[in-house]
Image (spheres, rainbow, N blue to C red):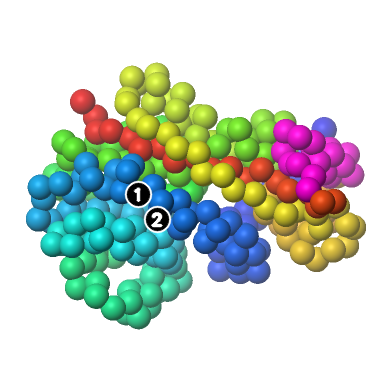
Amino acid sequence: MATIPRILNPMLDRTSQGHNFGLFEDLTQYMFHVPFLKAQCPACFFPSVGEGKANLNVMGVGSGAGEIDLEMFSQLHLKHPAVTVDNQVVEPSAQQLHLYKVLVSQKPNLDYIKFTWNKMTATEFEKHWRENHLTKKMDFIHMIQMLYYVKDPGATVTFYQSLLDRNGKLLVILVSDESGWGKLWRTFRTQLCNTEISQCVTTGDIKAYLDSKTVSYQSYKLPSQMDITECFTEGDQRGELLLDFLTEVLDFSSTAPPELKRGVLDLLKTPDCSKEVDGRVIFNNTLEVLVVDPLQ
């Protein structure tokens, strides 16, 4: 089967692909991340990183515009109202950092948080940390939907895990290997996946890596779904944007070889990827949360 040219990865270029990225965020981010954090954060990791400390060192790697970060801090502040926070923000997009700063300026009662802004990729920050021989330890590091954009996700996890204090936690959120994404990527990896990064990584890959290193962690499923019915209507604008996101190829409908497009659409309709509800095709977008313990 032919491989299509990788013109652009929309998930990497958020500014030029604003319509696509906004559509995906609308469909998934607030529907699933925030409710999970509100329901599960205290039980998952905040008690173990907050007990007995007056100040917490926190790092967000790939924090984007900060909505989820601030929701996390809100939950933390409810549990530990006297605790102050040093927050290292690692984000390569100038636009996203700007939006994060604007959000901070608009939110009241954040004086317990000190923000340090790092316009860097995860790899650049690792190099910066090593070159400057920094030794500060972190109580909590989160990497939400960002390991797709590094060359070696296992090595990246290990480095940031090495920054954890004795009772610290590393939070990783990615698509589950049991999701429709997992099936799509396993089937069309050579045709769709960008080999310069780890675009098609799932929690299954990370768990296998952690298991090989005998690293302890807890996992939590984060059920999520998207209505992709319009993908199957030729010429539907929303459907074409969704296909761009599902394949991470710009203008997939018009640039993909017919047999590849047909294969992708056929797979998306199967129970491995989606279910039919009241005549609508609902894609399994399930995410998984890994809460990783420090290196021993």
In the shown orientation, is residue 198 left or right of residue 271? left
Q: Which residue shows up at 26% across the image and 57% down it?
A: 76
Residue beneath label 1, please?
Answer: 41
Q: Amino acid at mark 1?
A: Cys
In the shown orientation, is residue 256 left or right of residue 294? right
Residue 257 x/y as whole percent: 86, 44
Q: Amino acid at mark 2?
A: Lys
From this view, report whether residue 108 is shown above or below residue 170. Answer: below
Q: Which residues are magenta?
A: 258-277
Q: Which residue shows up at 35% across the image and 49% down it?
A: 41
Circle 1 residues within 10 Å: few <14, some 14–19, many ≥20: some
Quadrant of res 178: top right
In the shown orientation, is residue 264 left or right of residue 162? right
In the shown orientation, is residue 156 left or right of residue 163? right
Q: Which residue shows up at 32% across the image and 25% down it?
A: 215
**Residue 210 or 29: which is nearer the viewer?**
29
Q: Are marks 2 and 1 in contact (CB under 8 Å)?
A: yes
Q: Is residue 69 visible?
A: yes
Instruction: Judge whether residue 271 is colored magenta.
Output: yes
Residue 212 x/y as whole percent: 39, 19
From this view, report whether residue 217 is shown above or below residue 227. Answer: above
From this view, report whether residue 56 is shown above or below residue 66. Answer: above
Q: Which mark is residue 38?
A: 2
Quadrant of res 216: top left
